[in-house]
Amino acid sequence: MRRLVIGDIHGGYRAMMQALERAEFDEKEDMLIGLGDYADGWPEVNKVIEYLRHLPNFEGVLGNHDDWLLNWLKRKDTPYIWTSQGGMASIQSYQNIPKSYQKAHSEFLTLLPYYTIIDSKLFIHGGPITTRNGIDMSRQTEQDMMWSRELFQDVAYSILYSRDTEINISPFEEVYIGHTTTQWLRDDFHPVIFQNVFMLDQGGGWNGKLTVMDIDTKDYWQSDFVPSLYPEEKGRD
């Protein structure tokens, strides 16, 4: 069984399927690990979630956008911060979709954890808060795990200012995060890897690409620029 991890999909079903096809993903045999933010942005949110929930070996975590979608599926909450950040695309994707699908998708998202650990590798959406002593998951809040950008900022500081600052991720060997597009660091749309921190949001929810990586070989595959796959859509500003 190969073990692949996928970055923030943001409703980009076409990008997801393209990247998985290029990775020669075997739906029945391979594991797919999702870093969250399956929702919001591109118009095929319901298709993304419907596909993921039927994979026999899917291991995903909850992202902040998925949490917003879950609140809408359960209670029809529509905070402006959500609808203005891709939430309207999610709402529209569920128009004319049977209520049974909405219920099944709500149940799927409800069961997703905030993080998962596989062979001393941590998979989390926003990234854990680290200290000089490493990462203590018992002290991470739900908001930290979905929203924190501190680990990204620590890596960014080291890269942008050529610092040799040690980022202690013990007891984990590797940490995989999404949530923050690496366009803030560089414009080549490749994954950013620094001291065994793997940042796999390459802007697929905006104007970038969607990334799939083999966590054992570190080979990776990407979609085309996602806007080119949705020429009829405006996407997020």
Image (tube, rainbow, N blue to C red):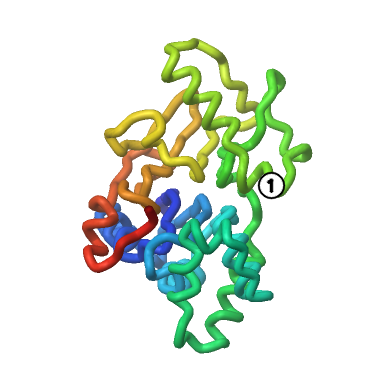
Q: In which quarter of the image is the N terminus?
A: bottom left
Residue at position x 42%, y 56% in the image? 9
Q: Could you tell me residue 82's position as x and y percent?
A: 56, 60
Label 1 sits on a secondary structure element that is helix
Reading the image, the residue beneath label 1 is: 143
Residue 3 is at least partly visible in this image: no
Between 138 and 66, the one lying in front of the other is 66
> Residue furthest toward the right?
138
Residue 201 is at least partly visible in this image: yes
Between 160 and 198, the one lying in front of the other is 160
- In the rendered structure, the answer to whether residue 45 lies left or right of residue 169 reads left
Count of numbered circles in the view: 1
Residue at position x 61%, y 27% in the image? 169
Residue at position x 49%, y 56% in the image? 85
Name the quadrant containing residue 79. bottom right
Q: Could you tell me residue 212's position as x and y percent?
A: 36, 49
Residue at position x 25%, y 51% in the image? 225
Above or below residue 125? Residue 129 is: above
- In the rendered structure, the answer to whether residue 127 lies left or right of residue 161 reads right
Above or below residue 150? Residue 225 is: below
Instruction: Tell me if mark 1 has few (under 14), some (14-19) or many (20+) residues whose alpha carbon lies within 10 angstroms of its own.
Output: few
Q: Could you tell me residue 39's position as x and y percent?
A: 48, 62
- Going by the numbered disc 1, the residue's amino acid type is Gln
Name the quadrant containing residue 148. top right
- In the rendered structure, the answer to whether residue 119 lies left or right of residue 214 reads right
Between 171 and 17, the one lying in front of the other is 17
